[in-house]
Amino acid sequence: MKSDARMTAVKGSAEPPRNSHKIDEDPQAAWQLFNANWLIIAVMGSLLALGLTSTNLRLEPIAFGTTLAIAAALLAVSYHHRLTRGDRTDPKLFFSLGTIGQVILTCAIVGPLSYVAGAIGYPLQDQALLSVDRALGLDPEPIIRYVNDHPWLAIILSRAYGLIKWPLLGIPIVLVLTARYARLQLFMLAMSVALAVAIAISVFVPAIGTYYGLQLPPARYPNIDTSVYAGQLRDILALRDGSLRELGLFKLAGIVSFPSFHAASAVLYMWALWPVRAVGGIAATINILMMAATPVIGAHYLIDLVGGILLAVASILAATSYLKWLKRTQRTSAASAPDWPQKLVNCANGSQTLSP
């Protein structure tokens, strides 16, 4: 059964899997989604190249080049394995290395791309976002004050906020080990869509953060780690006045406010790991904490969280709808294929008369 699945993944057969309800374990679907994700990566990479040539920004070459080299090495090993092993391709090896390679490459592109978007210089929307929060009865200032008055909570949220990076490597490993190849690629496709849309929206809705919108000095809340906000403030203002020109990949801050990609990531991570027994519940707890930390540690407006959650849900629906469309197309193609070759074989065997 495992060899059949591997052959399907390599040959790209149009036949649906026998256990169609186990879509998470379908290597063929995973392969198609893996290839589809390249289109979004290519578009974002092209926009980054175009943005760098049309702005005064430039990439620090050593960090960016090293990151690209690591991604290229992982992708080269995975593709070499597939090309040389043929029907014996191990989907665990291919999808683990290939997906981590795509993750690294995507992160190397979207960080600088968000700075290119920020350099366009649309008017800051902090007051508009704050007004939406207050219109919904969700003023961020009492939340900040409450967390500052409970130092233990501030510590927990500070640590939870920094957990956004680790699942990007952990999810491919967990889902590959549990043979959920298609779910892994659905997650990757949804994440790429969410990243691309979030950056596009941030062009028109740039903002610095709640402390800036509320005109609150961070020093008023000494128990809260405001270093994330300090990075946002520093880089956004430097982008807008032109003093920031070189982008060091490992020094970039998260400057996209609306929609919050921390909130979007939390939803995507929970969705990806939820079916994995003993892992899904732990992942949900951790990511809910990360989402709760977003308005405090990340200085996000509460409407940013709403936007991020909606973006994640829409991206998951888009990815799953695309997979359903692929499967419908394959079934239609298989059903409409001419049956005369098999008739000729049957006629030659004497089991059927060839008739018009």
Image (cartoon, rainbow, N blue to C red):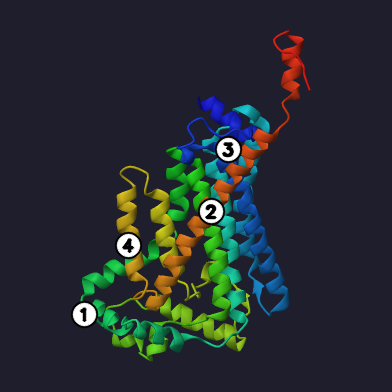
**Residue at the image point whose x is 40% and y is 87% from the top:** 131
Q: Which residue is under mark 1?
A: 149
Image quadrant holding the C terminus, namely: top right
From the image, state whether disc 3 or disc 1 is nearer to you: 3
**Residue at the image point whose x is 66% and y is 55% from the top:** 39
Marks 3 and 1, how far apart at CA: 53 Å
From the image, state whether disc 3 or disc 4 is nearer to you: 3
Residue sitting at the far bottom: 215
Name which of mark 2 and mark 1 comes first in the sequence. 1
Q: Which residue is under mark 2?
A: 319
Query: Amino acid type of disc 3?
Result: Gln
Q: Which residue is under mark 4?
A: 288
Query: Amino acid type of disc 2?
Result: Ala
Callout 2: 10 Å neighbours few (<14), some, many (20+)?
Answer: many
Query: Amino acid type of disc 4?
Result: Ile
Q: Given contact means CB atoms under 8 Å apart, are the residues at marks 3 and 1 in contact? A: no
Label disc, if present, on residue 61 of the rendered structure: none
Q: Is residue 108 visible?
A: yes
Q: Quadrant of the rendered structure where residue 138 is? A: bottom left
Label disc, if present, on residue 28 of the rendered structure: 3
Q: Secondary structure at mark 3?
A: helix
